[in-house]
Amino acid sequence: MGGHFSPGYAERPWGDGSFPPLYCPLTARIDDNLALVVNDRLVEWAAEVGIYAGRLDKFRNTGFGRLAVLGHPETDDVDALLLAAKMNAAWWACDDYYADESDLGATPTELPPRLALVMSAMDPPPDAGRYTAQVEEAVRSDPVLVALRSATGHLKRHAGPSQVMRVLNTTFQMYVSWTAYAAWRHLGELPPVWRYLAARQHDSFYTSMTLVDVVGGYQLDANLFYEPRVHRAVMQAGTASVIVNDLHSVEREAADDLPDCNVVLLIAEEEGCPLEEAVRAAVAMHNDFVRGFEDSQRELASVPSAELQRFLLGVQSWMAGCLEWHGASDRYT
Ligand SMILES: CC(C)=CCC/C(C)=C(\C)COP(=O)(O)OP(=O)(O)O
């Protein structure tokens, strides 16, 4: 079994080291041999389903397999880690092809109907005769949908029904925020920071964290997962991790013909301040969310559920692995 223990929290340097550190959990396991195994299998799968065709070298160097190994130190089980790698890669493919990357065909006006079809790819609705046949044809012809369906199939081999629905419903909820970004992009409007954050907190790595127990090989009961204090803790962790993403992707997101929403860019615009100052503000916001998670974790320590304590430690590990991964992935350098 991997190193499932808490190495604690620390102020961690990031980027070129010139900004204030991110207060974050320390990484429990760095195993680049295991990461290579998972990543190689992930690239084989990507070739089979057809995502990132012609760009597989770049996809390999992004290292979603490494993200899975860093984020789930609880297990060495390659098939379980591959499930996390596939789900995250498929979510990201959806983001790149539908939402963010103009050169991959992303357009704001097509995004809402595409996301609506994602729901049917991941959660096929009851048979509607020849209309269902048309849905199936559409799913088969789009590699992003094939990837999402295939990853969901892998999920179903490891998860119980409430875990599966938790992952699906969180995915669909996240897409409501994506449609907001698409509307702002289409209208050429920049949202105020509060409005962006309200959307981003429902479009965060909370989604990735819904896999923590599935990958760990146990089940956190749905009533505990959705217990308000637990939900708040996972939202705090998911938000902190997504601010890490915004901090690492400022340049990439400013470069697209239609720039993405990004908390750093929006703070700079709203405050009329230099980017450096906006980065500091985002770091402070991140650190507050991590401290909030730590407080929640302390408050929940008295709940007599081994699964819950294990889950919270898994979420803590995911935050740590996420920072580790963003600092090294070719996607952000
Ligand atoms: C992989 C996953 C669960 C995605 C959820 C949404 C999310 C946090 C991202 C896709 C990351 O946001 P963003 O589009 O800003 O990411 P990149 O900077 O493009 O990597």
Image (tube, rainbow, N blue to C red):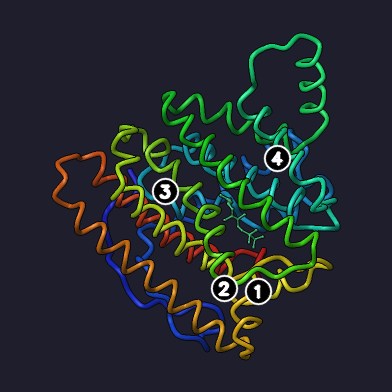
Tell me: residue 109, above or below residue 248.
above
Which of 214 and 207 lies nearest the eye of the viewer? 207
Q: Position of residue 125 (x, y in %)?
A: 64, 20
Hey, what amino acid is under mark 2?
Answer: Leu
The N terminus, quarter of image: top left
Label 2 beta carbon within 8 A of ligand 1: no
Q: Residue at x 70, y 40 (%)?
A: 115
**Left or right: 1 in relation to 120:** left
Residue at mark 3: 72
Residue at mark 1: 250
Q: CA distance from mark 3 to mark 2?
A: 22 Å
Tell me: residue 196, above or below residue 2.
below
Which of 12 and 131 lies nearest the eye of the viewer? 131
Going from N to C along the chain, the mark reached first, 3 or 4, is 3
Label 1 beta carbon within 8 A of ligand 1: no
Residue at mark 2: 247
Residue at mark 4: 115
Q: CA distance from mark 3 to mark 4?
A: 28 Å
Q: CA distance from mark 2 to mark 4?
A: 26 Å
Label 4, secondary structure: give it. helix
Which of 114 and 29 lies nearest the eye of the viewer? 114
